Image (cartoon, rainbow, N blue to C red):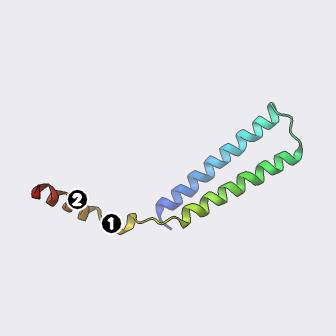
Amino acid sequence: MSKKDVTFIIGLTILMGVIWILGELVMGLWIAAHVKVHIIWGIGVVVLTLALSVWHSMKEDESHLTDPKREKYERKVGKRKQ
């Protein structure tokens, strides 16, 4: 697991936590919701978080296949040829 993946997972977890808290505040302060709605909301946030995390882990990341120094060299050589 790369640093990029860990950063994504931590950021996603924090974002979904904030969304869950905001939803609970809205349901608690402005919308009269039953206990079942709170449970469904919590389960929905967890399922969405897991789905996004799995999607991100399945996505092909090819950034490690390219060498930044080699790309810089190719750009310089390409400018000289033109």
Q: Amino acid at mark 2?
A: Lys
Residue 46 tag number: none
Mark 1 or mark 2: which comes first in sequence?
A: 1
Examine the rendered structure and indicate whether residue 75 appears above or below residue 31.
below
Looking at the image, do the residues carrying marks 1 and 2 touch, with CB atoms under 8 Å apart?
no
Report the residue at 20% width, 57% height from top.
Answer: 75
* The C terminus lies in quadrant: bottom left
Report the residue at 65% width, 49% height from top.
Answer: 16
Examine the rendered structure and indicate whether residue 2 appears above or below residue 13.
below
Question: In the rendered picture of this protein, how many numbered marks are placed on residues?
Answer: 2
Q: Quadrant of residue 71?
A: bottom left
Badge 2: residue crowd in 10 Å (few <14, some 14–19, many ≥20) = few
x, y percentage for residue 35? Answer: 88, 45
x, y percentage for residue 48? Answer: 68, 55
Q: Secondary structure at mark 2?
A: helix
Q: Residue 70 versus residue 77: which sits nearer the camera?
A: 77
**Relative to 42, 71 lies left or right:** left
Report the residue at 81% width, 51% height from top.
Answer: 40
x, y percentage for residue 81? Answer: 10, 58
Badge 1: residue crowd in 10 Å (few <14, some 14–19, many ≥20) = few
Q: Which residue ends up furthest to the top in the rendered image?
A: 30
Whole-number angstrom distance, CA of label 1 to CA of label 2 = 11 Å
Name the residue carrying label 1.
66
Q: Secondary structure at mark 1?
A: loop
Q: Amino acid at mark 1?
A: Thr
Name the residue carrying label 2.
72
Q: Quadrant of residue 51?
A: bottom right
